[in-house]
Image (cartoon, rainbow, N blue to C red):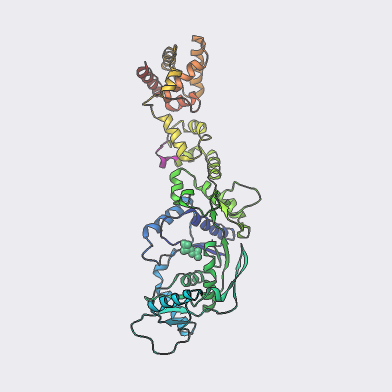
Amino acid sequence: MVVTRFAPSPTGYLHIGGLRTALLSYLWAKNRGGKFVLRIEDTDKARNSEEATQAILKAFEWLGLEADGEITYQSQRDEIYAKYIKQLLDEGKAYKCYMSKEELTQLRETQMAAKERTMYDGRYHDFTGTPPEGVAPVIRIKSPKTGEILVHDGVKGTISFQAEDILDDFVIARADGAPTYNFVVAIDDHLMGINEVIRGDDHLSNTPKQIVVYEALGFDIPAFYHVPMIHNSNGKKLSKRDGATDVMDYKEMGYTPQALLNFLVRLGWSHGDQEIFSFEEMIELFNPKDINKSASIYNTEKLDWLNSHYIKNTSNAELAELLTPYGVVLTSHDKKEILLDALKERAKTLKELAALVTEIVTTPSEYEAKAVKKAFKDAAFEVLEAYSEKLKANEPHLPTDYHALMEEVVSEMEIGFGKIGMPLRVALLGKMGGPNIDVIMAVVGKEETLLRIAKAIEKNS
Ligand code: GLU
């Protein structure tokens, strides 16, 4: 069974690069009928926060990504790590290194002066003497000194690392006993049964170290897929300014979960030239071997395009629900279908849609000077009065009813349609623009329409 994982370090919000690897890991597990597990890598007590963990979980909830089983917290696994450190020491595969900070600094300076690469020189590798006093040792793993370490990567192919270049018996436990990052990742991936690791290629340089740990402990090495980074349109690594913000900011900005997930799955993966993928389709079609080899480009227009696609194709009942966090309560409005049908093509985001709805359902308190000048001229107020009389004498309900009454005024007063349409629009909205005026009147209803007409006449005459 395929088991994938997402293993964030809770040092801040979840950003979209992280979310993308989480999504790809999730999709692949589900495609294979496997499991997707979550591990919180919270060993760095100074930088981690419970708040950040909660932020990650909240983002997962919003997007409908659910991890299987219990969440693993590295901060609760010290005993497990200690057991493996002891095992490696007992087996002679790791050793205590008593080099003091001063000695390390000195070694580094000497190497730098000689223009050599700075690295630990292995002086405690075979040490059997009496340890120096007053130095708490770190634990180093005995890593291969020659040959190559091969990373078989499902995206990048086989990558060879020269053992001597990168592995200087790296530390697996610090002087205070705290295990180090690459050590615990390998142990946890093994113990959690993870056999396919999909992660950002910024972790590629860690992989040979993790392989050393796997091999020292006799664990099977998982399949790796290192996903190229997301770049901005200038080919630089995505920064906050480009959109590498908190995933929850996308909710705030009015993006739907489907649009964001669809956007992310296409960043670095493709299936022919298909752009729109339902969640089910993503699961069905995703395969990590189709991940692109080169960096992907973040493109806001694409995200907007996808978002408007999903807004257009969401049922009005669901849209009404989705709009509530943006301060618009339409769920029990009897004209929400008419209103949303008229507006959903015009909005790139839920926030924009909420603003459009608000504009219509709120009585205008101001009237745009330019619009007033254009609309409230000649006999405009007489026309508005005539329309009010028609409204009072009838019980219009649908946009067509409001339209029919406009037609009556137009023919009775022998005026063009613009002579009633424009004044009504400005009376109802305080400005030009917006959907059909009959739709607006039907949505706000007869009483509110009468009120807005009276107010517009009063304020502008
Ligand atoms: N904790 C690491 C991070 O947040 C990810 C580790 C991994 O995927 O192996 O960058």
User: Which residue occupies 60% across, 51% down?
Assistant: 281
Residue lying furthest right: 272
Vertical side of 437 occupied by 188: above or below:
below
In the rendered image, residue 37 lying in the magenta stretch gets the answer: no
Residue 7 visible to an observer of this rendering: no
Q: Quadrant of residue 457?
A: top left
Give the side of residue 102 with respect to residue 116, left or right: left
Identify the residue at horizontal 47%, vertical 84% (top origin). 125
How far across and down, in percent of the image, does residue 93 sit? 49, 82
Q: Position of residue 166 (x, y in %)?
A: 53, 73
Q: Is residue 74 above or below residue 439?
A: below
Q: Measured from the top left, where is residue 174 in percent x and y?
A: 40, 75
Verify whether residue 327 appears in magenta.
yes
Q: The N terminus is located in which quarter? A: bottom right
State the image coordinates of residue 380 (x, y, percent, origin top left): 44, 14
Q: Nearer the viewer, residue 180 or 105?
A: 105
| Vertical order, 174 against 235 (above or below) | below
> Which residues fall within the magenta stretch?
323-329
Q: What residue appears at the point 45 percent right and 12 percent down from the top-left corner?
A: 378
Seen as rendered, the residue at the extreme front is: 113
User: Who is closer to the viewer here, 170 or 364?
Assistant: 170
Q: Does the rendering let one see residue 231?
A: yes
Q: Is residue 461 left or right of residue 222?
A: left
Q: Residue drawn 40% across and 79% down?
A: 103
Eyeballing the image, is 392 above or below 351?
above
Q: Which residue occupies the foreground of this view, 134 or 173?
A: 134
Location of the C terminus (image quadrant): top left
